[in-house]
Amino acid sequence: MSQQHPDRSTASRPARPDASMSLLTNAMDHSLDDGYAQAAARRGVEGRSGMPRTVRAKLGLAAGLVLAALVVTVGAAQARVSAPELAKERQELISRIDDGDKRADSLQRSVNSLRKDVEAKQRKALEKHGGNEAEVVGLLSGSLPVHGPGVKLVVDDAEDTQDTDSGGPRQGSGFSDNGRVRDRDLQRVVNGLWESGAEAVSVNGQRLTALSAIRAAGDAILVDNKPLVPPYTLLAVGPGQKLSTAFQDSADGQYLQVLEENYGVRTSISTQDDVRLPAAPSLIVRTAEPVQTGEGSRS
């Protein structure tokens, strides 16, 4: 008996063109495993800690603000506590400085008073034992004030004290500013006044003696360790016009003129009818010899 094939109630689906590539198609359609996909979906809805992300961020920000406020509050409290102590220490330092200044001023007044007493006793001793030459010795040594005709010489820095490369008496000296008066310039001017016939010389009221020193400390000029500032006013007691002419014709006067012409150093010289110079301060007697009086020679 023949067996008949059953009739199919539904028609078969048409074959897909990529049916032969089913493995590649499945890999592309299902690139992520179903378990991983479900886990990622749960994390997206609940989050790792089970808390919505916005709430967690707000709590973190609030905690940071509370911590910052706590730090600022503690710092302010410490500053408020330490402020009175710092103010007290500062006031104590100011008081100590004021007391030190007062003591220094008092000691300086005592030194000045003692110095005047010593100078007066030196002058009296010089007058007593110096004989007829006492006044001359006092004038030459600078221990006595002096006045008389003379000259007034003013030396000042140039208005524009920029560097120059021109030659002259300062070439190769290493000075950074050729328009400023230096200690060696002042030395030459003073020596030129002495050589021209000056009997006594002062610089800015500072009496010069045989022991005086003119040197530099940085940009400042020191005369007997006392700083001077320009303009430098030199007063010299001597034969007026003759002293002025002799100085301007001397080598040191020509040196000063070169500084004026090449570097702009400002100078002026004039004769004076009456020049007054003070005594040299704190003149120290370094060596002394006893004076042979009549009584001493008989013994």
Image (spheres, rainbow, N blue to C red):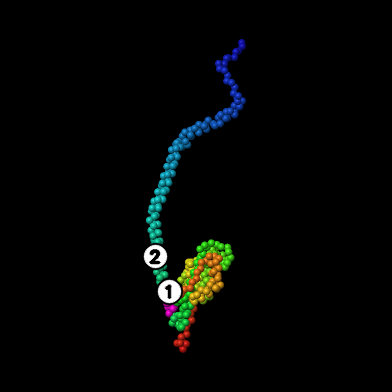
**Depth check, front residue: 140 or 59:** 140
Residue 21 visible here? yes
Q: Is the magenta stretch mostly helix, strand or loop?
A: helix
As shown in the figure, which amino acid type bears the numbered disc 2?
Asp
Q: Dot 1, how many residues are within 10 Å of its Cα: few (below 14), some (14-19), or many (20+)? A: some
**Depth check, front residue: 191 or 149:** 149
As shown in the figure, which amino acid type bears the numbered disc 1?
Arg
Residue marked by disc 1: 115
Q: Vertically, is 126 above or below 61?
A: below
What percent of the width, then of the height, locates residue 1?
61, 10
Q: Vertically, is 220 above or below 83?
A: below
Quadrant housing residue 16: top right
**Pointers 2 and 1 in contact (C-beta within 8 Å):** no
**Depth check, front residue: 50 or 214:** 214
Q: Residue at x 40, y 61 (%)?
A: 93
Residue marked by disc 2: 99
Q: Nearer the viewer, mark 2 or mark 1?
A: 1
Q: Dot 2, how many residues are within 10 Å of its Cα: few (below 14), some (14-19), or many (20+)? A: few
Residue 162 circle label:
none
Q: Disc 2 to disc 1, how far (Cα)? A: 24 Å
Quadrant housing residue 174: bottom right
Q: Residue at x 51, y 74 (%)?
A: 244
Q: Residue at x 57, y 20 (%)?
A: 13
Quadrant housing residue 26: top right
Q: What stretch is highlighted in magenta?
A: 117-124
What percent of the width, then of the height, locates residue 111?
42, 72
What percent of the width, then of the height, locates residue 212?
50, 73
* Residue at the extreme bottom of the image, as rendered: 298
Q: Let me know if residue 225 is in the magenta part.
A: no
Question: How many discs mark residues in the rendered view?
Answer: 2
Residue 199 visible here? no
